Amino acid sequence: MTTSTAPLPIQACSPAEAAREVAREIAALIRERRAAGRMAVLCLPTGRTPLGVYDELVRMQRDEALDFANVTTFNLDEFLGLPPEHPQSFRRYMRERFFARIGLEPTHTWIPSGDVAPAQIAAHCAEYEREIADAGGLDYALLGIGRNGHIGFNEPGSARDSRTREVRLHEVTRADAARAFGGLEFVPERAITMGVATILGARRVRVLAFGADKRDILRRTLEDTPGPQVPATFLRGHPDVRLLADGAALGR
Ligand code: GLP
């Protein structure tokens, strides 16, 4: 796949409709894979945006007997320097917001390690790529989008062929995280993220964007010439990508 100026298919919908639609697609994938005796491999984000999807999947487990036994998950990213129990670690977010609620086996959930020793980071990232490949690749990548156009923590400047690696966080990303951390000085400066190419390797990609805060970056994602200045532009041209966004984010 080469960088493409193809338009990004858009579905305008409310956050609640988007959550139901994405959860429905994920549930159908899980059931289809189970019927074939296979695992469903999901790529999952953190942030505020996907919370409705997690709530809806929890509801489907309770009300519709959705079974997660054949699910493997790989998270997009993690802050470096945070132990797994840190209140702002993505591992803790995922456990509290999703994994513990559905009883997902910890052995089926992969998240880059935030407390890996500096000398081990490169090997840890290579291992993450290997685990994704060994799982058969990502079936379904769910993404949010940062106000600077990042996907995962692929900050402006990230190459289309980038893989899982250590990155320095962009000032907009750190400023957006400052409130949750109780001050900018407590926000880590570095992180590990799946690469742009890792994400684009997913067989299906769904991007969520809600609220007026995302309007400017969404316009650039949809209209700019694709390139590293807005990493989300690289999603255009993926063979099965869709943006689910509300009117406020779309400026409609
Ligand atoms: C975070 C994550 C991204 C996420 C983005 C937007 O820091 N690394 O994966 O999509 O920023 O967050 P939110 O959904 O809270 O707007």
Image: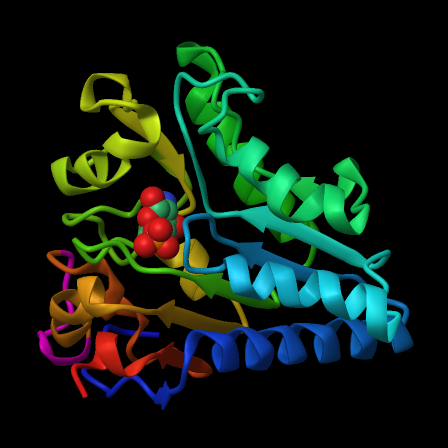
Residue at 34% across / 32% down in the picture?
A: 180
Is the image coloured rainbow, by chain, by secondary structure, or in one colour? rainbow
Residue 169: image x %, image y %? 23, 34
Badge count: 0
* The C terminus sits in image quarter: bottom left
Q: As drawn, is 111 to the left or to the right of 227?
A: right
Residue 168 appearing in the image: no
Residue at 74% across / 41% down in the picture?
A: 100
* The N terminus sits in image quarter: bottom left
Residue 139: image x %, image y %? 61, 67
Inspect the magenta stretch and tell me whether residue 249 lies in it: no
- Quick check: 249 above or below 146? below
- Please name whichever residue, 98 or 3, is drawn nearer the observer in this view of the structure: 98
| The magenta segment | 222-228
Rendering quarter of residue 164? top left
Magenta span: chief secondary structure: loop
Q: As drawn, is 116 to the left or to the right of 183?
A: right
